[in-house]
Image (cartoon, rainbow, N blue to C red):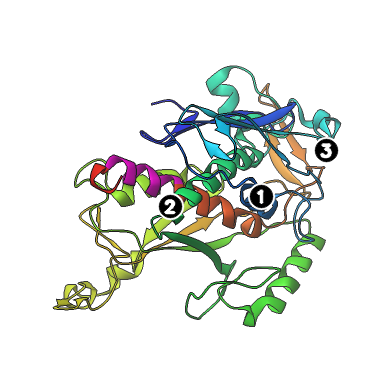
Amino acid sequence: MNANTFGNNFRVTTFGESHGSAIGVVIDGCPSNVEFDLPFIQSELDRRRPGSTRIGTKRNEEDKIKVLSGVFENRTTGTPIAMIIENTDQKSHDYSSIKDIYRPGHADFTYEKKYGLRDYRGGGRSSGRETAARVAAGALAKLILKSYGIEISAAIRSVKDIYIEGDFIPPFKAPLYTVNSTKDNEILSLIDKTIQEKDSLGGVIECHIKNVMPGLGDPVFNKADAVLSYAIMSIGAVKGIEFGKGFEATKLYGSQNNDEMDENGFLSNNAGGILGGITNGEEIIFKAAFKPTPSIAKEQKTIDKNGNPVKIEIKGRHDPIILVRALVVVESMAALSILDLLLENKKYV
């Protein structure tokens, strides 16, 4: 397993660091003659872009994508596609005061234990900025899936202990892109209060994948839900995932949880579109739990690299809540997963 590569058929390798000159992605295994819609790919990156929302980081990157190879006359050539995004608004000096201190909730301690050194400027490869490269690849995957009629959308289902009721009906409204906007004012007030308290928030993102054909995934190690779980859990802030009824199913009888069938198909979708690791043709539904952003200005206890106890207040420009910018990242990893499974099933290609 390559720690920087995702996928067996549509292989995506990301590279670069948060405060390096650029981040980027190389895609191998993309079919030839796919329409390469650069404006759409850029629009997906704009959804994740730092500085795009008042409730996010003040780091203001344009995140303009540059295509280096694999595309000719707006069509993919079947050869590796390379894309980069230059970093233009990094402020590495913001991190000089903590270069020898491990930030609570971050990968600083474990990264140094693994590699013997770490890039303290924004976390290097462990930074959430790496996900911009995934979004570029995911946008291309969405374009390919669109030709099969497959649609992917995500929305915020809860923030902290505020749960948003309602059916999942895209499109969702700015600025929060919650399942419905009835509690947006309450959530925005909570975010403002949390910012004043120098703290951060987490929550749950719900994702739906429509029009997936039955038969994707394998019954043992390459289950469709296992592939999706691996993809979503690889997003740095995600701490849990569930499909369909998920943990709620533990409170039900089998007679309540089983999806009965008649001559017209399934009568419910408690399984979330996947049975025995294989897609059943119903809508794939999952929820991902995001932890609060670990970078906060509130004083915390930690240690330095010599093991001495110290206190830390993290300076710099950080998201008080990552959910809004993470929506497109969840969609992108879902798209990469489904496309990889589809390409594995040759009868659909």
Which amino acid, by three-letter code, is at mark 1?
Answer: Pro
The crowd level at tag 2 (other Cα within 10 Å; few <14, some 14-19, many 20+) is: many
The crowd level at tag 1 (other Cα within 10 Å; few <14, some 14-19, many 20+) is: few
Residue 205 showing in the rendered view = no
- Where disc 1 sits, the SS reads helix
Of residues 55 and 335, the one nearer the viewer is 335
Q: Quadrant of the C terminus?
A: top left
Residue 183 figure quarter? bottom right
Could you tell which of marks 1 and 3 lies nearer the N-terminus? 1
Q: Are marks 1 and 2 in contact (CB under 8 Å)?
A: no
Could you tell which of marks 2 and 3 lies nearer the N-terminus? 3
Q: Is residue 337 magenta?
A: yes
Residue 32 figure quarter? top left
Say left or right for 224 vs 84.
left
Mark number displayed over residue 226: none
Report the magenta stretch's main SS.
helix
Q: Which residue is mark 3?
A: 89
- Where disc 3 sits, the SS reads loop
Image coordinates of residue 242 in percent, x first then y, are: 38, 59
Q: Is residue 263 magenta?
A: no
Mark number displayed over residue 145: 2
The Cα atoms of the two marked residues, 2 and 3, are separated by 33 Å
At horizontal 57% and vertical 62% (from top left) the residue drawn is: 203
Residue 181 showing in the rendered view = yes
Q: What's drawn in magenta, residue-wise?
A: 336-344
Q: Quadrant of the N terminus?
A: top left
Which amino acid, by three-letter code, is at mark 3?
Answer: Asp
Which amino acid, by three-letter code, is at mark 2?
Answer: Leu
At horizontal 78% and vertical 56% (from top left) the residue drawn is: 198
Residue 59 figure quarter? top right
Mark number displayed over residue 39: 1
Image coordinates of residue 260 in percent, x first then y, are: 17, 76
